[in-house]
Amino acid sequence: MSFTLIVTRSTKFAAPAQQVWSLLTDWAAIVDWMPDGYIHSLQLENNAAGQIRHMVTGQGVQLSERLDRADTEAGVLELSMIGQLPWSLISYQATGTVQQCAPGNSSLTWCGKAELASAGTAADKLEKLLSASYSKMFLGIRQVVESDSNTQPAEMQASSFD
């Protein structure tokens, strides 16, 4: 019997939801905004099911993520890790939800669902790793969109995102 680990984190940005959404759905941009040398290399692949990015982290871990869904109207992005999975994973899917909070402000909720062979030390380590990764993701996005929002015209900052 396997063990399912769910890690959910949320944050708010002083930037319009459309800016956050654009950054998340630019599948190659992660190499530019993820901080601390988190992504060492990136290669993109297109296929019928969705765009795939093959990455090597700064620590040499190889990951392949497939963009499963990008619903602009709902602000929902879904991805899954494919191929050979690291960290004793059996499967991993993540859902990011971007919402407009107020003019010029948005939120991002990221929920990862990981399946492992069992609970225990591996699951505990993975929870810490995912939490740290989500925090770095939020930091990287914040650095881009909040600095960009200071230079955007007022009408761009207040654009709606439904």
Image: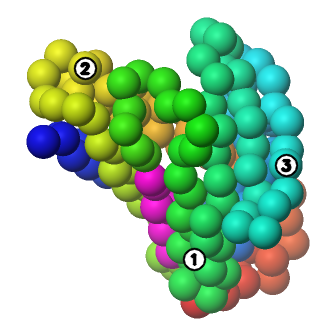
Residue linked to disc 2: 122
Q: Note whether 147 is above or below 154 in the view shown.
A: above
Element on which disc 3 rests: strand
The front one of 65 and 21 is 65
CB atoms at circles 2 and 1 under 8 Å apart? no
Residue 86 appears anywhere in the view: yes
Near-viewer residue (1 or 145): 1
Q: Is residue 104 visible?
A: no
Dot 3 or dot 1, earlier in sequence:
3
Q: Is residue 95 magenta?
A: yes
According to the image, label 1 marks what residue? 75
Disc 1: CA contacts within 10 A as few (<14), some (14-19) or many (>=20)? some
Q: Earlier in the sequence, mark 2 or mark 1?
A: 1
- Residue 135 screen position, x and y as percent: 46, 35
Name the amino acid, label 3.
Glu
* Mark 3, residue position: 45
Query: Which contiguous range is marked in magenta?
Result: 93-99
Residue 111 picture quarter: bottom left
Residue at x-position 13% and y-position 22%: 120
Q: Nearer the viewer, mark 2 or mark 1?
A: 2
Report, in whole angstroms, how far the alpha carbon at label 3 lies from the one at label 1.
23 Å
Q: From the top left corner, tell me how far across and down residue 142 is, in percent.
A: 62, 45
